[in-house]
Image: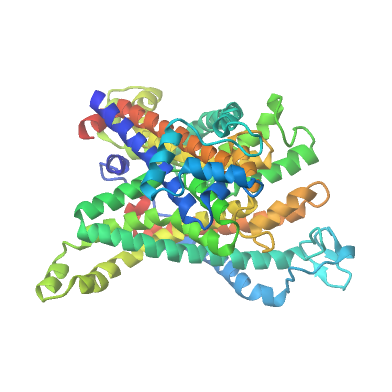
Amino acid sequence: MGAYVARRLFFSIFVLWGAVSVIFLVLRLVPGDPALILLGPDANPSQIAALRERMGLDEPMLVQYAIYMRDVVQLDFGTSFRFGTDAMQHVLDHVPNSAQLALTSVGLALVIGFPLGIIAALKANSVVDRIISVFSLATQSLPNFWVGIVFILVFARGLQILPSYGQGTWQHLVLPSITLALPFLAILVRLTRSGLLEVIHEGYVQTARAKGLRERVVIFPHALRNALIPVVTVIGLQFGALLGGAVIVETVFAWPGVGRVLIESISHRDYGVVQAAILLIAAIFVFTNLVVDLLYGYLDPRVRLAG
Amino acid sequence: MSDVVSDLTRPTAPATPPPRKTGGKRPGSGRIRFSATVVSIYVFAALFGPWLVRYDAVATSTPDRLLPPGSRLSDGSLAIFGTDDVGRDLLAQILQGARISIAVGVATLLLAGIIGVTIGVSAGYFGGWLDGVLMRLADIQLTFPSILLAIFIAALLGPSVVNVVIVLAISNWVTFARVARAQVLSTKGRDFVDATRTLGARTWHLIRRCILPACIAPILVVATVEIGSVILAEASLSFLGLGTPTSTPSWGVTISNGRNYLSDAWWISTIPGIALAVLVVSFGILGDALRDRFDPKLKNL
């Protein structure tokens, strides 16, 4: 197990290094002076000269890369030219808000998605199953920025029972978290259903039935545990889509999270903050996948032996 | 990591055959017919709609501002879907938007397909260290949320139709590469390939005449599955102000414009959203049905 954890950890660090390098490369491939791009159009010449010197733009590319990596390792993304504060700190200040939204959404999706998926699998090809699968196909394909707008129209403008934007009470959390949860929920339903259907005819499930166990015991501890294995992986992979979706949902509902900071910084060309936000989201995503991989090894011991 | 994952998600025991649907001789006939019809209507509307209902990007008509669906305009014509904040007909905007969405979707898939197939075929055919490097690259990109990459690149490049295509192609090539590679691996050991090689065919000839034709069917299926999400991604980027420029009437831009008028004019944001959702759902159904019929094993890629 120790070697398995070490290998996964190594791969995660490797991916993060890849992300940092891509950001470095893209910044230099795009036409224009990286120092000017990072500081934005309002920077004065002395600031630009200072950053050029710190970034070592007159040095060879490899030296520049080394300097860049050194700063990134120290979580130094420069200062936000809009606020004059540390760029990473500015992003970190908004993490609790994003975490609140993301965790509520994941919770909602799990609480609703699993039961719906299990019902759909147990009653496969019935009317209930059809309704659930149409529902999940629709919610997966609906653009979530549009769903958010429709929610605002119906519940905030029409019925006037929920606030349409901002943050504060639990009511503020309702619309954004449901909007963010929907596509995730849909995938969860489809996966739980297909995962359960795949194992339900396997020998060990039939053995459990033949032993005379009650259906509840057959399904929950026996079938579900193996049905969950693919579901767990996809939850990890889908977490990235959730973080991307959060950027959009936070914009629609003016939710003061990392996603909104990202979009605002882009429109103000505050690229230090943009880099910090992207790397932070990437790091959270990679870390989540690491946890999922480890969980996976716990759920399915074959992974540890094979990998 | 991908090897482990794909090994496990692939069913180990033979899966029970899916129950046959009624209303079609082969599985999914009904779904294919239905969704293909909807998609054709969209393509038709995108091609010919803007000729029938003229859209003028710079026209403004103050008396026709924010008219609800079904109103008469000041020049006597009927605005089925109403007008926007400067008095432009919403139907004309949506038709123009269909053109942009479908064009961006197709262009993106062409570019992503070319990049992906080139990389996938090289990796699969030549193998060795090239395969290792290219597929690790694909793994890394797969572990990284693609919308974030798109947002970052789009933010630096600035909004334009060409940039959207580049950005989305960069974030979508991996699926094509993996499918092409898998197809190459299963084809290159076949007898007819060996026979052709024995007859003296060069590498280029083998790839072009033996390997690539085997890739076409699965690649087309993948393209159909992907196009819905590409169109959705374009709309999302445009909504955020990072996709098509605000002067183009793409669906994302129109929906974003309508946000400022939610209390007075609900239709500006809602109707283009419905148009977008129906198209994406139809592509989703079509892609799933084609995959189930032609290549069920693609499900895990």
Q: Quadrant of the C terminus of chain A?
A: top left
Instruction: Find residue A212 and report its horizontal and vertical position in percent.
Output: 31, 23
Q: Quadrant of the N terminus of chain A?
A: top left
Residue, x 32% and y 59% (percent of image)? B119
Residues B88 and A225: in front is: B88
In the rendered image, is residue A186 in sight?
Answer: no
A77 left or right of B93 in image = left
Where residue B3 sits, quadrant-wise, is top left
Q: Is residue B232 above or below residue B49?
A: above
Instruction: Find residue A3 and report its horizontal and vertical position in percent.
Output: 23, 27
Where residue A147 sits, quadrant-wise, is top right
Q: Is residue B207 above or below residue A190?
A: below
Instruction: Find residue B21 and report its horizontal and vertical position in percent.
Output: 43, 55
A265 left or right of A160 in image = left
Residues B15 and A211: in front is: B15
Identify the colour scheme used.
Answer: rainbow
In the rendered image, is residue B135 in sight?
Answer: yes
Where residue B280 sits, quadrant-wise, is bottom right
Instruction: Find residue B6 and report its horizontal and vertical position in percent.
Output: 30, 44
Residues A294 and A198: in front is: A294
B236 left or right of B180 in image = right
